[in-house]
Each structure stands twice: as structure tokens, then as C-alpha cells.
């Protein structure tokens, strides 16, 4: 090891080679191009929605609806982005959301009211993340396998707790948060939480050593270790973070659906990974942005919304969704490489 | 360079906290005891005890309320007969695992088999195998490929669900000119969803004043029901009636309706969940009725299996033998008759 390693300064790209001035202008420009191309895709979708269904689509209530529907998976995706950027993967997010949501809505938990539900949802998420993190960081398991095992176990436990039944929430203070009048300055409560998580995620990734370490571990774990980063502990924290996001998402889902069910969070892992990838996160780690991931989530939710408003059936929806993923990634590639 | 070891005390603290949290949380997993589930009090086929019968029961994993009610119905019905022993397998959604379980039951030489296949087509062979081994098979709900694989099929009527939902809505809207109806379907890649929609459309053809303006498919889950219904409500600012295929996803649909502050239409559900029955009885929301897909069919399957083993017919019918096929009626449950069905509602 002769090359000195400096931790990357920007989450959007690799660190510049040592001894060379960081060309932050180029980097910012490149990141902007990626984000801009995503915004372009989103704008195109909005145009399609606005042309096909002007009255229903371009409506404040519809905007609130799209953002609300994006909130649950959005929070999960923020956590997932961190994990993927570190070169890992978390396949258990959907199952953790399911387990948290049913554990937090059992009759016994509901006796503790609002605080009990919130506390349990978050704690179960964090506990699952902790197990993932310990297995991966200190047990030496491959993230794919460890989180796959968590997926199976958490889903099984969720089923065991519910016996397949739908657990309906009877706590008014929880339900009220999902009502149409639970708006702060016209922003639904769920969207507010999503926004706060996004901002915190962005700050942590771009403005803290934790964020830089994450990028460093994802870029080159060995180099990061030689640079004095405790790679194991960093990995542990990252899966804890993903678990925490799942716990918060589970609470949002409880508010939104007024219930807990073991089928909750179905295929969230794929949705979150897809949104992060569309957002420009490198699956092999080292690169990614929170803004990109959030735009990825919004693109998906907007597509679903436009399809539903136009009464397209699920077969057409699925075909088009696949095509749009490919198109979005290709557009990004092209615009990013031409600069 | 060795891996820097984390400070032991901190790790210990972390683990200790986790363990503590675990202990704290286990206190919260309990749910209320389910009580007597979906047990029906209708008389059994022939109540005089006959020769002792062992019935093998194999079903899919009870991962949602309806399937759970199927298991409960089978168990509680078998318990009512002093002459019936029920051998029930661990439910599985894996075709290979279910085949193995059924073969075990065949080897145990049970008198009759009741099979609710995870996948009807895929389990046809093992049904045939049982029949060839001289064990009559009662095929429950999801039908085998060939009638040779079962002695008697009993199941719900998906087409009839749609038909009856359509006629109920048609009757309610008969005085409304240019009425608009929307449909919240179940999982679209299942044959049964297509059948339900077909029945619904066929029924609506009898009412020229009614037009179906939108249809979206959810996934039988609360979450998907909420999401799809919220979009449907946004897409259709005004409509007169809604048919939702499934009461489980209906919990989510009702939540979305409440969140949108809408109450200007009537809603009909499907399947017959307890929550739906309770809402219909309270009659303070949009949900006015639900069409049944009765889980009591598992109790009837036990009756039929017992009758088969004891060579009895169905009381009330003239024949000496039980029928080879029984399609259950998808009754409409509304405020007028909900009390009667309340005990069969599943969670």
C-alpha cells in the first residue's frame, strides 16, 4: 500500500486523487446533471399526467396524495441508500416493516397508546437492524445472506404474531395523524416526517464524518480501514440506521392504513433498491445521493398515480413500469456521460 | 495492521440494551385469545355417531384471515363429532412440501382426505394417487385439474360473488339515472379475480342505467387497498357505488375513503370478514353489504368427508351418495341478515 488515501469529500463521487486540486466545480456539475435528468423524467411524467387528466392530476389533493403514498417507501429508501452506498444491501426492509407494524399493533401494545405504538415500531426496527449489523459486521456474513435470513425470520415472526389476522388500530391519537385534517401548513403529517428524514439523511451523508466514512467504506473498504476507519462498526451502524428507517416507516404505515398486517411492506426491498438505483446510487457502493433516491421514489409513485387516474390495469402498469425504469437509467447514463 | 477492536464496555452496553429491549418487547406480542373462531352452529349431516373415521386435512399456510378461518372451521367441526379424528398437517404454500405432507397422510392410511391445495393444478397428481390408493378425496375450493382426482369438490363461487354484488348494486341504484360504479379488484394475476370481475360485469349488463367507470386491482392487503382506493377516489370525484373484492383490503379501502372524507356512495365488500360485518351492522359508513366467500366450507368439507367414510348421503337430499360437486352460494350480507352471519366472520 503506497498510495495515500483520503476519504472522499463528496458523496456524489469518488475522491479526487491526492495531490490534485479537487475539481469541485466538475463534480457539482456532474451531480447536478444526474439530478437534473431525474427532474426531467419527473417533469415529463407530470406533463403526461397533466395532459391526460388535467383536473384530477393537477390538483392540490392529488399532490398531497402522491407525496403521502411516497412517504412510507421513501423513508425506507433513505436508509437503503446509506446501506447500498457502503457496498451492502438490505433485503429485509419489507419484512422488518411488516414485523414492526404488527408488533406495534397487537392488543397488548395498543394498551400503551400512542407512545407504546411508536416506541415498539421504532424499537423492533432498530433491533432487527442490530441483528443484521452484528451478523454482517462481526459475524462476517455476506449482507445478501444475512438480510435474506432476516427477511424470512421477520416475516415468519410477523405471521406468528398475527396468525394472519388484520390488526386494527383503535387508538384515536394515532388514527388522527392519518386523517385529511392532520396537515401542517397544507403538508400531510406523513409527508412532513418523510421530509424531515430526507433532510437529516442528506445532512448526515454530506455534512458529517459518518457520511464520509460511509462513502469511504463503500468506495474501498480496505483503503478505508487503512485510513483508520472502523469499518465493522461503521457497517453495524449502517444496518442499525436502515432498521431505524424501517421502524419509522412502519409507524407511518400504521398511521396511513390504520392497521398492522403481516403482509405489509410486500416487496419494499425491491422498490427501495430500484428507487435508489434510478436515483444514481451505485449498487457496488461508493456513490449515491439522497436527493436522487427521493426523486426515484417520487418517479415511481407518480407513475402509479398517473396509471390509476387513467384507469390502466395492472398488466399494462407493470409493463410500462419496467420500461420506464430502463428509460430513466439510460437517460441518466447518456446525460451523465456527455458532460 | 490489525482491525481496531471496539471498546468492549461499549459493545457490552449495546448488547445489554438490545437484550433488555427484547425482554421488554416480548411482553407486547400477545393478542387477545381468538375465542371460538368462525364456528357455525348449523346441524351436522347426520348426528348419530357412526364408525370411527380418521380424516386427513392438508391446506396451505394460513397467512391471511380467510385461510386461518378455514383451518379453524375444520378443527372445530371435527371436534363436534365423537367419531371423527382429524389429522391436520402444517400448512404449506410450497407445492413440493404439500405433496409430501399428503403422501404422508396416504401412507398413514387415513380414511378420507380433505385437500385445499396451495395450487390446484400442481397437486392434481397427488390427488389422483390418493384416489388410486382407495382414499376418497374431498377437494376444497381450489380445484384439481381432473375430476378423477377427487370424489367430491366443494368450494366458493367467484363468478357468483361478482354476479350477486352486481345485482345488489343494480337493485340499490335502479332509480338513479346514469349511475357510475367503480370496482376495486383483488390480485390481478389470479384466475379468481378475473372470474369475480366477469360476474360483476355480467350482472351490470342487466342495468342499462349503470356504467362501470373505473377498475383498479389491489393485492388483497390492507396496504394495497388503501393505496389503490386513495387513487380511485382522486380519479373519480363522483360515483354511486363501489364493489371491493376482498374485505381484508377493504380495511385499507375504508381507511382511504375516511381520509378523503367521502361518503357519497355505497360500498359492497367481499369474503365476509368480521370487521366488515361489524361495520355493516353499525351502518354509519359507506359499507352497506358484503358478498360471501364462506370459510365455513371447511366445516362442510369435514361433514362430507365423514359422510363419505360412513357411506352416508346428505340429509335433505334424496340420493344415497353425496354429490360430486358442490358450489356454495355467495350470499349477500347486509343489515337485514348480518346477525345470522356474524359468528362466521373471520379476523
Image (tube, coloured by chain):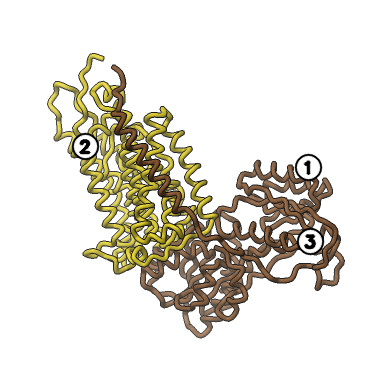
Chain colours: A yellow, B brown
Left or right, B250 with reference to B18: right
The span from disc 3 to disc 1 (Cα, nearest Å) is: 25 Å
Using the image, determine if residue A327 lies above or below residue A259: above
Q: Secondary structure at mark 3?
A: loop
User: Would you say residue A102 is visible in this rendering?
Assistant: yes
Residue underneath mark 2: A30
Mark number for residue B107?
1
The part of the image, by quadrant, that contains residue B320 is bottom right
Local crowd at mark 3 within 10 Å, few (<14), some, or many (≥20)?
A: few
Q: Are marks 3 and 1 on the same chain?
A: yes
Task: Specify whether disc 3 shares its chain with disc 2.
Answer: no
- Label 1 resides on the chain identified as B
Cβ atoms at labels 3 and 2 below 8 Å apart: no
Task: Report the residue marked by disc 3.
Answer: B324
Q: Is residue B196 above or below residue A140?
A: below
CA gap, disc 3 and disc 2: 70 Å
Give the residue displayed 75% in from the left and 56% down from the top.
Answer: B138
Amino acid at each position: 500500500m503506497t498510495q495515500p488515501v483520503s476519504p472522499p469529500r463528496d458523496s456524489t463521487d469518488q475522491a479526487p486523487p491526492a495531490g490534485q486540486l479537487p475539481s469541485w466545480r466538475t463534480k457539482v456539475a456532474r451531480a447536478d446533471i444526474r439530478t437534473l435528468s431525474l427532474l426531467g423524467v419527473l417533469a415529463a411524467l407530470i406533463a403526461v399526467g397533466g395532459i391526460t387528466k388535467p383536473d384530477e392530476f393537477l390538483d392540490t389533493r392529488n399532490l398531497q396524495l402522491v407525496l403521502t403514498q411516497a412517504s412510507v417507501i421513501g423513508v425506507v429508501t433513505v436508509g437503503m441508500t446509506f446501506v447500498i452506498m457502503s457496498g451492502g444491501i438490505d433485503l429485509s426492509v419489507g419484512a422488518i416493516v411488516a414485523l414492526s407494524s404488527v408488533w406495534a399493533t397487537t392488543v397488548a401494545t395498543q394498551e400503551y397508546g400512542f407512545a407504546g405504538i411508536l416506541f415498539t415500531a421504532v424499537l423492533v426496527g432498530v433491533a432487527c437492524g442490530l441483528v443484521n449489523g452484528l451478523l454482517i459486521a462481526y459475524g462476517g456474513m455476506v449482507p445478501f445472506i444475512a438480510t435474506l435470513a432476516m427477511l424470512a425470520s421477520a416475516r415468519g415472526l410477523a405471521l406468528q404474531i398475527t396468525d394472519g389476522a388484520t390488526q386494527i388500530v383503535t387508538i384515536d391519537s394515532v388514527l388522527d395523524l392519518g386523517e385529511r385534517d392532520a396537515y401542517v401548513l397544507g403538508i400531510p403529517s406523513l409527508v412532513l416526517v418523510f421530509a424531515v428524514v430526507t433532510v437529516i439523511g442528506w445532512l448526515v451523508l454530506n455534512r458529517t464524518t459518518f457520511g464520509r466514512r460511509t462513502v469511504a467504506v463503500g468506495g474501498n473498504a480496505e483503503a478505508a480501514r487503512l485510513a483508520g476507519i472502523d469499518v465493522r462498526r461503521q457497517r453495524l451502524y449502517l444496518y442499525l440506521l436502515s432498521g431505524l428507517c424501517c421502524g419509522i416507516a412502519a409507524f407511518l404505515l400504521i398511521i396511513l392504513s390504520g392497521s398492522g398486517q403481516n403482509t405489509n411492506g410486500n416487496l419494499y426491498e425491491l422498490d427501495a433498491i430500484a428507487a435508489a438505483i434510478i436515483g444514481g446510487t451505485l449498487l457496488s457502493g461508493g456513490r449515491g445521493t439522497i436527493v436522487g433516491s427521493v426523486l426515484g421514489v417520487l418517479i415511481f409513485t407518480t407513475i402509479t398515480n398517473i396509471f390509476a387516474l387513467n384507469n390502466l390495469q395492472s398488466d399494462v402498469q407493470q409493463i410500462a413500469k419496467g420500461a420506464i425504469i430502463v428509460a430513466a437509467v439510460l437517460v441518466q447514463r447518456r446525460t451523465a456521460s456527455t458532460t | 495492521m490489525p482491525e481496531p477492536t471496539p471498546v468492549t464496555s461499549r459493545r457490552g452496553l449495546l448488547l445489554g440494551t438490545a437484550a433488555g429491549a427484547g425482554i421488554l418487547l416480548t411482553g407486547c406480542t400477545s393478542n387477545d385469545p381468538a375465542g371460538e373462531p368462525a364456528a357455525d352452529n348449523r346441524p351436522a349431516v347426520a348426528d348419530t355417531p357412526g364408525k370411527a373415521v380418521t380424516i386427513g386435512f392438508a391446506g396451505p399456510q394460513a397467512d391471511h384471515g380467510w385461510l386461518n378461518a378455514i383451518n379453524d372451521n375444520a378443527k372445530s367441526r371435527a371436534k363436534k363429532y365423537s367419531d371423527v379424528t382429524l389429522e391436520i398437517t402444517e400448512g404449506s404454500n410450497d407445492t413440493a412440501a404439500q405433496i409430501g405432507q399428503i403422501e404422508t397422510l396416504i401412507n398413514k392410511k387415513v380414511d378420507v382426505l380433505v385437500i385445499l391445495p396451495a395450487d390446484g393444478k400442481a397437486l392434481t397428481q397427488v390427488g389422483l394417487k390418493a384416489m388410486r390408493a382407495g382414499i376418497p378425496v374431498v377437494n376444497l375450493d381450489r380445484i384439481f385439474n381432473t375430476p378423477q382426482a377427487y370424489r367430491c369438490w366443494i368450494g366458493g363461487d367467484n363468478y357468483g360473488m361478482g354476479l350477486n354484488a352486481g345485482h345488489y348494486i343494480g337493485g340499490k341504484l335502479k332509480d338513479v339515472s346514469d349511475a357510475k360504479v367503480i370496482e376495486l379488484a383483488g390480485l390481478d394475476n389470479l384466475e379468481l379475480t378475473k372470474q369475480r370481475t366477469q360476474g360483476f360485469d355480467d350482472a351490470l349488463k342487466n342495468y342499462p342505467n349503470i356504467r362501470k367507470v373505473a377498475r383498479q386491482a389491489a393485492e388483497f392487503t390492507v396496504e394495497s387497498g388503501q393505496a389503490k382506493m386513495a387513487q380511485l377516489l382522486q380519479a373519480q370525484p363522483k360515483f354511486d357505488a363501489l364493489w371491493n373484492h376482498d374485505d381484508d383490503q377493504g380495511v385499507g379501502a375504508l381507511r382511504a375513503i375516511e381520509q378523503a372524507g367521502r361518503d357519497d356512495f355505497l360500498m359492497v365488500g367481499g369474503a365476509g370478514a368480521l370487521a366488515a360485518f361489524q361495520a355493516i351492522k353499525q351502518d354509519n359508513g359507506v359499507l352497506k353489504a358484503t358478498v360471501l366467500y364462506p370459510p365455513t366450507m371447511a366445516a362442510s368439507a369435514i361433514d362430507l368427508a365423514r359422510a363419505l367414510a360412513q357411506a352416508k348421503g346428505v340429509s335433505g337430499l334424496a340420493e344415497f351418495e353425496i354429490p360430486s360437486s358442490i358450489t356454495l352460494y355467495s350470499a349477500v350480507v347486509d343489515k337485514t341478515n348480518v346477525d345470522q352471519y356474524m359468528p362466521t366472520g373471520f379476523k
